[in-house]
Image: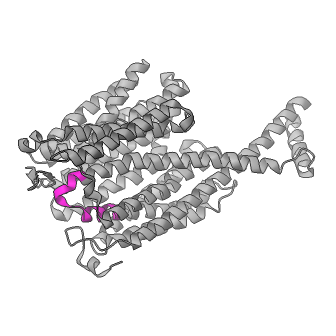
Amino acid sequence: MAAEAPNGRAVSKGRLSHHPLLAVAAVLLGAFIVSYDTRLFVLGLPDLRGVFGLSFDEVGWLTTVATAPQLLIAPAVAWLATVFGLRRVLIGPSLLYVAVSLIIPFVRNYEALLVLHFVHGLLLGVFIPATIMIVLRNLPLQWWVAGLAAYSFRLSFTSNTGVTLVDLYVQHLGWQWLYWQDAVVAALMAQLTWLGTPRESTNRELLARADWGGMLLLGAGLALIHAGLDQGNRLAWFEAGTVIALLTGGGALIVGFLINEVLVEEPWASPTVLMSRNVILVLLALITYMITSLSNTMLVTNFLLNVPQLRPGQVGGVLLNYVALPLIAVMVAAVYLLRRIDARIVAMLGLASFAVAGWMGTRITSAWAPDDFIPMALMQSVGQGLTFTGLLTFATSNSNPVRATAFVAYIQVMRLDVSELATTAMTTWLRVREQIHSNLVGLHISAGDSEVRQTLARLLGRFIEHGASHEAALARATNTLASFVRREANVLSVIDGFTIAFWAAIAGLLLISLMRPAPAGPLVPKSANSWSS
């Protein structure tokens, strides 16, 4: 049953599950649904745009409507689970999610698609916070590390298998499985939740003192900010009134939330939960992880799709075989290490691996093929498996159990809005750097230059040999030379991205070195207390 702290705040303590393996399986499936849905939806957008007959602007807003609603509900889910119990919070939304996922592929009306994707995204916002609460409230202490590792595992595994799955669904099984996969997994998750979590009664005293205003202000504010960030690159940022309105409105609601938490008698997620040296440092380290992990989830994929212009199926093989599959062994190693050494050391090993991968990325050339990325992919697999698991374990071990629901709310802010900010910033960086490099490379190409003339002559002869007229061959030769410039500019921009990833990993290592040992608890091995910063 949900407990209550002396000050009235919800306590993250519930009845132990009588089937912990089933509860852990539900944790894993719930987290996988969110990660796979997000990854597959983004990768499958070009195909979905064609199937639904959407314009560029329509598909842009569909993306925002499918993701931003997660933030409306996600921060409040931990509190709702504490008050109503996990069964009530998780099973009903899971079944509704099944129905929505089955229906979407049959809809062609744009307004109906927006509504269904809004509901779809809102329901996704329930699953990950609820799965964290299963670990913290219903599992025996000896299962906590494994549960947190399962939660961490899904992020990296789904990111690196998503390309392969999209290719499988679109090319072979049918694009509908981009949605129907979720329906199958959500139904199984609902069943496992029913079997693996205990029955809990509603805590009516906490319900009577609910800070509904705080929940609404934070959720709505974060959703608007997320929407503004998502639309920023498409609408040229502050040149668009829509982006300004979304970001300004979201910021105003967040300010209102902070004021509400000061004035309300029983604050739901008081920012004072973050007022700890270790908590602040670990949250900053998580930001560096989100940035440096883009070397895996964004930069490798962008390079292989845009430079050698490979198909998703050709790209997915490297990510599947050399990041996702080795990640299984890495996660087992992470659990083993976290039960024996300080979580800070585990996270530092992961960030050091990301730093090496980032350094490797600064050596790429336009001649690189998928196999050239294998050493980098293996280092990224180690980084993905150790960094987030170590940081999440350390963050949890430093949180106050009495205020865990507030802490989980801020973890959702990190997971969604800060992650979106990191991705958007990297996307903007790559676009701007590509433009700069294109201009700089172009400055060294002159029509009278001997090498340029020789290159154009070779290309001209090649196209004439294939039957093109002189005028057509010259035009094609000129366009081909321009494409060489764009290719090299693209390579240089990706190198700049890897440079950012490298320095983010270094910054993360410095932040961890400033952390103090976590207080003794179920997530801290005895030997960890002997290592201090």
Secondary structure mostly seen in the magenta stretch: helix
In the picture as drawn, the residue positioned furthest to the bottom comes out as 530
Residue 324: give x, y in percent of width and height: 44, 55
Q: Is residue 108 above or below residue 189?
A: above
Q: Is residue 530 above or below residue 12?
A: below
**Picture quadrant of residue 344:** bottom left
Q: Residue at x 23, y 71 (%)?
A: 519
Residue 362: give x, y in percent of width and height: 62, 61
Q: Is residue 403 magenta?
A: yes
Query: Can residue 183 be seen here?
Result: no
Residue 225: give x, y in percent of width and height: 41, 40
Residue segment shown in magenta: 389-406
Instruction: Name the foreground residue: 250 vs 497.
Output: 250
Query: Can residue 59 be seen here?
Result: yes
Left or right of 512: which side holds 410? left
Q: Is residue 407 magenta?
A: no
Left or right of 51: which side holds 471? right
Which quadrant is the C terminus positioned in? Answer: bottom left
